[in-house]
């Protein structure tokens, strides 16, 4: 079988999860890595048996055998490296957050389209076995019409070990852009609609830093419903990564971290629902990326989806500044839900 030849750009911490996930797939292999530090390149090449290492992304992009790249470094670099990679004819999986302003997101989408390559944003929590199962349950209509959802990512911000660029909003850091993206991605996915407005409170409440560590956002969707996203990087506490969805005929809870579960509530009782648990967390993500390239279809978290999530995040920041609900000016850039189709089941009134 012809394997998709991949290059990984940026060998900080999370590149390991990408390499681990690729190692679980038969149809993808890492053939090159790029990092400014020789010891990083050596570490990855030795551990994962990767044949080629380059000092910069520009050198890696000249490698004709590389068909697709993962852009896995600081948020302020996502835009330029993605555009460069698209212009070099490579498919791109860019880590979250997609970029640090909407103009950059637009450039990335345009570069992918102009070069006829796939662009996928690494909203990794979208691909967890627990998330996939939760969405499947909601789409089945079994729980009846959706009413609301509240999604959390509340965890220790890990200030001492957090690199400076991730603590600075100027560089696209702070809890909201760093991790709030996951929460808004999951929330918008389960709400099965496009966001129309946001009202939010965002700030640095637990740490002294040039980026936020706490955000609570109330998001209204086109389907007339609203959901809440909570992303907090506290100094001490206990984590919560759960998402709770309330429908007319049942409730749903799911979480991947801490306790891993999918639970449905009916008849005043919660019951665990079995789900497919991939061997490693990024397995489904890489499977989807490879499938999109092979079949020439859009990946689930495609560029337009990625942009919409960022639009919600930036509008929330605007709401914090103005103290008002901010209406999103997105048009109809995308029309389909990433599960394939919007919820179209006719629910009886209850
Ligand atoms: N999806 C997830 O769950 C998840 C988890 C953690 C991090 N992330 C994201 O992954 C990205 C990377 O985070 P990290 O903490 O692993 O990275 P990092 O910031 O620790 O490391 C980045 C690496 O890129 C290298 N680099 C910088 N410029 C380069 C260039 N031009 N060419 C080649 N190498 C270059 C640096 O030397 C460094 O080793 C961020 O966007 C982060 O938000 C995602």
Image (cartoon, rainbow, N blue to C red):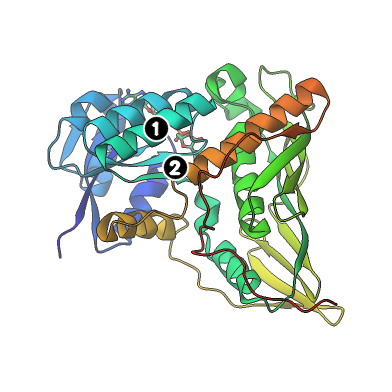
The disc at residue 259 is: none
Read off the residue under disc 1: 108
**Residue 181 appears left or right of 252:** left
- Whether the residue carrying mark 2 lies under 8 Å from ligand 1 is answered with no
Q: Position of residue 112 (x, y in %)?
A: 33, 38
- Whether the residue carrying mark 1 lies under 8 Å from ligand 1 is answered with no
For the point 78% across and 75% down, the residue is: 250
- Quarter holding the N terminus is bottom left
- In this view, 143 is above or below 175: below
- In this view, 100 is above or below 229: above
* C-alpha gap between disc 1 and disc 2: 8 Å
Q: Position of residue 150 (x, y in %)?
A: 76, 53
For the point 77% across and 55% down, the residue is: 225
**Residue 170 appears left or right of 268:** left
Q: Position of residue 58 (x, y in %)?
A: 23, 24
Read off the residue under disc 2: 303
- Which of 190/260 is in front? 190
Q: Earlier in the sequence, mark 1 or mark 2?
A: 1
- Quarter holding the C terminus is bottom right
For the point 32% across and 46% down, the residue is: 118
- Which of 104/210 is in front? 104
**Residue 317 appears left or right of 60:** right
């Amino acid at each position: 079988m012809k394997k998709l030849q991949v290059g990984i750009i940026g060998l900080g911490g999370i590149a390991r999860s990408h390499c681990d996930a690729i190692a679980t797939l038969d149809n993808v292999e890492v053939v090159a890595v790029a990092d400014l530090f020789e010891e990083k390149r050596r570490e990855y090449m030795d551990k994962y048996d990767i044949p080629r290492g380059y000092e910069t992304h520009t050198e890696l992009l000249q490698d004709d055998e590389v068909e697709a790249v993962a852009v896995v470094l600081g948020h302020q670099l996502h835009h330029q490296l993605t555009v460069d990679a698209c212009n070099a004819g490579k498919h791109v999986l860019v880590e979250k957050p997609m970029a640090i302003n909407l103009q950059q997101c637009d450039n990335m989408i345009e570069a992918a389209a102009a070069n006829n390559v796939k662009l996928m944003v690494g909203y990794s929590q979208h691909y967890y076995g627990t998330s996939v199962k939760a969405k499947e349950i909601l789409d089945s209509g079994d729980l009846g019409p959706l009413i609301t959802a509240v999604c959390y990512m509340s965890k220790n911000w890990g200030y001492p070990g957090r690199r400076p660029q991730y603590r600075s909003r100027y560089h696209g850091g702070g809890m909201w852009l760093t991790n709030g993206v996951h929460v808004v991605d999951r929330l918008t996915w389960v709400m099965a609609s496009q966001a129309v407005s946001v009202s939010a409170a965002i700030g640095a409440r637990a740490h002294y830093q040039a980026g936020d560590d706490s955000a609570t956002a109330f998001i209204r969707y086109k389907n007339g419903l609203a959901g809440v996203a909570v992303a907090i990087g506290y100094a001490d506490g206990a984590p919560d990564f759960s998402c709770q969805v309330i429908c007319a005929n049942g409730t749903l809870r799911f979480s991947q971290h801490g306790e891993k579960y999918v639970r449905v509530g009916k008849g005043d009782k919660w019951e665990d629902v079995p789900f497919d648990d991939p061997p490693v967390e990024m397995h489904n993500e890489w499977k989807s990326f490879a499938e999109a390239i092979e079949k020439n279809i859009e990946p689930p978290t495609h560029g337009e989806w990625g942009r919409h999530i960022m639009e919600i995040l930036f509008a929330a920041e605007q709401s914090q500044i103005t103290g008002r609900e901010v209406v999103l000016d997105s048009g109809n850039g995308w029309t389909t839900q990433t599960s394939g189709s919007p919820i179209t089941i006719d629910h009886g009134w209850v």
